[in-house]
Amino acid sequence: MRFILSMFCLMLTAGLAQAQGCAEKEAEVRRKLQQAQEQGHDGRIRGLETALKSLQASCTEAGLQAERQDAIDEARREVVEREADLREAQADGSPEKIEKRQRKLSEAQEQLQDAQAR
């Protein structure tokens, strides 16, 4: 049960990643909590109540900004790594590897843009 609750909170946090601040995150959790109550989902209600308490206790704008910056930094590292992989594939000359590495680089660049847009 604890594992399920942890996974639920993780999914909830990931789903709220687009929210701009603590107030928006709290409003989103409250909205989902109301839906769960209307549908009678007891497990989900408990998970959302836990998530709401955690959010109220620990969410700060500075903390959110730090999380955003961490995500950007990680995405940048991924882009640098994918660029190196592409250069290596180009040196080898294999068209299949080059195409695969280019695709992975494009994905990493998109993730970086998403992280920067938050």
Image: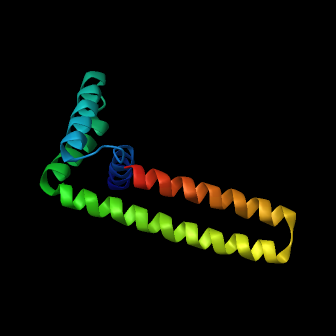
Q: Position of residue 67 (x, y in %)?
A: 31, 61
Q: Residue furthest top?
A: 38
Percent position of residue 47, x then y: 27, 44
Residue 79 point in image, percent of width and height: 56, 66
Q: Which is more toward the observer, 88 or 29?
A: 88
Residue found at x 22% / y 61%: 63
Q: Is residue 101 above or below residue 92?
A: above
Q: From the viewer's perspective, is residue 67 above or below residue 54?
A: below
Colouring of the image: rainbow
Q: Residue at point 24% right, 33% down?
A: 33
Q: Is residue 42 above or below residue 53?
A: above
| Side of 110 where 61 appears, left or right | left
Give the quadrant of residue 46: top left
* Tally of marks: 0
Tell which residue pokes out farthest to the left in this image: 57
Describe residue 66's horizontal placement relative to residue 82 as left or right.
Answer: left
Residue 84, located in which quarter of the rendered image? bottom right
Picture residue at 49% right of the left edge, 58% below the top:
112
Residue 90 lies left or right of residue 35; in this view the side is right
109 with respect to 37 (left or right): right
Give how far across and how far down residue 48 sits, in percent.
25, 41
